Image (cartoon, rainbow, N blue to C red):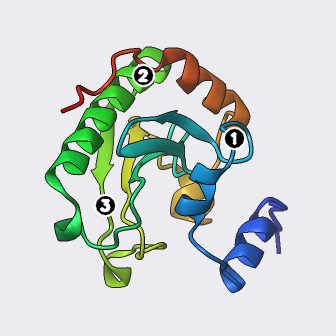
Amino acid sequence: MDHIWSPWRMKYIRRHKSPKGCVFCDAVKMEDGDKNLIITRGELAYVIMNRYPYTSGHIMIVPFKHVGKFENMDQETSAEIMFLTRQGIIALEKIYQPDGYNMGANLGASAGAGIESHIHFHLVPRWGGDTNFMSSIGGIRVLPEDLTETLEHLKDAWPKETYPSK
């Protein structure tokens, strides 16, 4: 039997066996950098890299307020989330020129939400052929870039425009 070694997975496994608090609420309390992977902060929401990405550049847009249901998000937060999603597409286009995007949210555990108590929205750049034999047969993702490199690229490419306040 062949073995593929991925030691980074153990952090994920251990973290999910005994969750303490909310990873999204905890992340905003830290200084932005390699530890929390926050790219930018708005007034009501922020953008963070997915620590276990589907593809390079996989980001999430998260409200600051700990809200678990889409219908409980206020209109202003919803609007800023769409603004930040648009900015994410602009930055990802500048860096990676993907062929397309998956964007959306997994609402509830049955829909695949790994963290259902704090709503978050995924923006995943996609390329033709990015699902190869490693994903299809081995259930393994191969990322061509380190997360800290992706973080720096995204910070540098992020549009300077800010969301209009009330």
Q: Is mark 1 in CB contact (under 8 Å) with mark 2?
A: no
Q: Earlier in the sequence, mark 1 or mark 3?
A: 1
- Residue 91 x/y as whole percent: 42, 22
Seen at 29% across and 43% down, the residue is 81
Lower position in the chain sequence, tag 2 or tag 3: 2
- In the picture, residue 14 is in which quadrant? bottom right
Q: Look at mark 2 in the image and give the residue it sits on.
A: 91
Please, is residue 32 above or below residue 118 in the view?
Answer: above
Indicate the quadrant containing the N terminus: top left, top right, bottom left or bottom right.
bottom right
- How far apart are the two marked residues, 2 and 3, measured between alpha carbons? 20 Å
Residue lying furthest front in this view? Answer: 166
Residue identified by numbered label 1 = 31
Q: Amino acid at mark 2?
A: Ala
Residue at mark 1 to residue at mark 2: CA–CA distance: 22 Å
Q: Amino acid at mark 1?
A: Glu
Image location of residue 35, percent across then percent down: 74, 46
How many numbered dots are placed on residues in this image?
Answer: 3
Question: Which residue occupies 66% across, 80% down?
Answer: 19
**For residue 85, side relative to residue 118 (left or right):** left
Q: Which residue is tagged 3?
A: 105
Nearer mark to the viewer, of 1 and 2: 1
